[in-house]
Amino acid sequence: MEALIGISYVVFERYFKAGYNSFQILFNSRYNSKISGTEVIKELADVIGKMNPLNVVDLSNPTHTVLVEVVRNVICLSVVKDYAKLKKYNLLACAGIEDVTEKTPAAAEEMKSDVEEADVGGQGDVPSELEVAEDQDGEEDAMSTGLEYDGGDS
C-alpha cells in the first residue's frame, strides 16, 4: 500500500495540485482478494485532499476520475478527464449507436441472413494463402497475402 501511495503523489501532481477539481475514485479488482477497495479509495482520496484542499469528491459529474485496477498482484492507476461525461470512453455510446445485443431476435436473424447472402461461396473475399498471377511478360509472379516469396526453390 505504501508503494501505491508513493506513486500516487507523482501521478496526481499534474491533475490535482492546483485549482479547483472535482474527482471520483473507481476501484476494480480481479483475481485478488487481499487488497481492500475501500481502503485504497480512502488512502487515495486523502492524498488528493492533502495536495490541494480545494479538491472535492463528486460522484455524479466529476472533472477527473481516478481508475484503480488490480489484476492479481499488479495495480494500475490512471487519471482520466470527463469519464462520466464521455460515457466511460465508450465510443459506441458517445456516437449514439445502439448496442447490437439489444436488438430483437428477428432483427438479429435478419442481420445473420444478410451476412450469409453476402458470403455465398462460403469463403467470401478471403484470398488463398498464395495466389499466382501472370504479368505482362507472361511470367508468373507471386502475389502474397501474408507470405513473402523470395523466388528460391523450397
Image: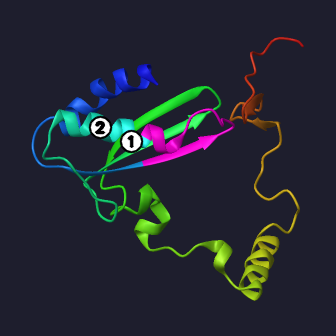
48 left or right, relative to 27: left
Q: Amino acid at mark 1?
A: Lys
88 left or right, relative to 101: left
Label pair 2/1, CB-CB below 8 angstroms: yes
- Spatial separation of the CA atoms under disc 2 and disc 1: 6 Å
| SS assignment at label 1 | helix
Rendered image coloring scheme: rainbow
Question: Which residue is at a point 73% across and 32% down the rendered structure image?
Answer: 144
User: Residue 82: image x %, image y %?
Assistant: 30, 56
| SS assignment at label 2 | helix
Where residue 46 is drawn, which disc sits there? 2
User: Residue 154: image x %, image y %?
Assistant: 90, 13
User: Residue 42: image x %, image y %?
Assistant: 38, 41
Where residue 42 is drawn, which disc sits there? 1
Q: Amino acid at mark 2?
A: Asp
Image height check: is 59 above or below 66?
A: below
41 left or right, relative to 29: left
Neighbours of disc 1 within 10 Å: few (<14), some (14-19), many (20+): few
Q: Nearer the viewer, residue 128 or 29?
A: 29
- Magenta span: 26-40
View extreme (left): residue:
19
